[in-house]
Amino acid sequence: MPSTPGGAAVATPAQDRGGKFLTFYLADEEYGVEILKVQEIIGLQPITRVPRTPAFIRGVINLRGKVIPIMDLRERFGMASAAEALAGATEAEVAAAEAVRCIIVVEVVGPTGRAVPVGIVVDRVSEVSAIAGAEIEDAPSFGSGVRTEYLLGLGKSQGRVKLLLDIDRVLAADELEQLPDADVEADAA
């Protein structure tokens, strides 16, 4: 959302928010991120934990020689972990759920104004949806204790509501500074 010189947030016109979104699921909720922010979708792979990072930063991966920080959106949004959500499920159900979990590599604008690749772990990818600006509503106010600044809006498409993320706001500037340096070349060995 743009801001005024005094720093107050200004509503983005609905027509500016429309476009194509890659949609994905966390639990039973469908989310979307602007397709232009998406670099690629990859399968889950071993993640190296980095000490002293926020709990929702799972660690880093080596993606073709580049170190990419990985964020767990379930943890970031205060949801039950995937393992907790699957507690009590059969082995087949757990295997099926794990088979579709993946990482979406997105570009997030960092505190220096430069694009930083970040991987986000999601339960499953859904589709690419074209959502017109007129089909996007502002997130409702839930009171002072509920943060919704990371939402671009609520998209109404195909009879469902999709929570459209402003991926640049999912991580606050101070949290982006804590990410492992994504520009570091990884050891290809």
Image (cartoon, grey):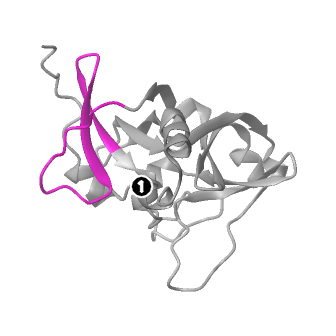
The answer to whether residue 162 is above or below residue 119 is below
- Asked if the magenta segment contains residue 54, the reply would be yes
User: Which residue is the site of mark 1?
Assistant: 83
The magenta region covers: 45-70
Q: Nearer the viewer, residue 60 or 99?
A: 99
> Looking at the rendering, which quadrant does residue 52 occupy?
bottom left
For the point 51% across and 71% down, which residue is it? 8
Image quarter in which the N terminus is found:
bottom right
- Asked if the magenta segment contains residue 10, the reply would be no
Callout count: 1
Image-based side of 111 in relation to 169, left or right: left
Q: Nearer the viewer, residue 37 or 40?
A: 40
Q: Position of residue 119 (x, y in %)?
A: 39, 37
For the point 39% across and 32% down, which residue is it? 44
**Disc 1 residue type?**
Ala
Q: Position of residue 10 (x, y in %)?
A: 60, 65
Q: Nearer the viewer, residue 167 or 76?
A: 76
Q: Furthest residue to the right?
A: 159
For numbered disc 1, what is the local secondary structure?
helix
